[in-house]
Amino acid sequence: VGTLLSFVSFGLWVTGIVVIMHSESSLAVNGFGEIITANLFYFTWASVITAGVNFMTNVKKLLRIREESQAIVLWFGMVKIALVIFGAATQIWRSIDNVCTTSVVGGGGGKSNMDEAEFSMCWRTQYALAAGAIGILVSSFCCYALYTMKSYVYLAE
């Protein structure tokens, strides 16, 4: 019952992030990801992290992971962090992709139509998308490997 309730809580907060952080009608951020309401922004992320820790604690019990094995908990944490990075970068990219692609295509080299701030924001957002995607893949693989190779888990710690 605890695992189910912690999963529901985590799922509701992840769904709440979409509503609270949506760029077109956002309660916490504007279209470029700038924070409008700081308390709502930080409280939402703190709640997601807390619900995620609660869910992971229950999943650890469900999967019968020994207390000594903290590596899988850390890798699950990395999955969550990478998902946050990828999700935030995706939201920002959806609001600036027309600026980045039209300037690059029509600019003859990419940078001539954009000022330095626009170029930097496009590059940083693309970097965050790549880092988030790679982080999700690598940390998910490590979680899978640690869970399937239980006898070798303690060698990695």
Image: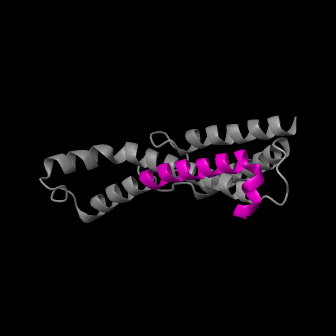
Q: Position of residue 73 (x, y in %)?
A: 73, 55
Q: Magenta region, mostly helix, strand or loop?
A: helix
Quarter of the image where the N terminus is located: top right
- What residue is at 66 percent from the left and 55 percent from the top? 75
36 relative to 61, above or below = below
For this orientation, the residue located farthest to the left is: 108
Q: Nearer the viewer, residue 95 or 125?
A: 125
Q: Position of residue 133 (x, y in %)?
A: 48, 49
Judge from the rendering whether residue 152 lies leftward or rightward of residue 113; answer left or right: right
Judge from the rendering whether residue 82 lies leftward or rightward of residue 46; answer left or right: left
Tell me, yes or no, if residue 73 can be seen here.
Answer: no
Q: Which residues are magenta?
A: 129-157
Q: Nearer the viewer, residue 11 or 144?
A: 144
Q: Nearer the viewer, residue 130 or 122?
A: 130
Q: Position of residue 66 (x, y in %)?
A: 85, 54
Question: How many numbered marks, from 0 up?
Answer: 0
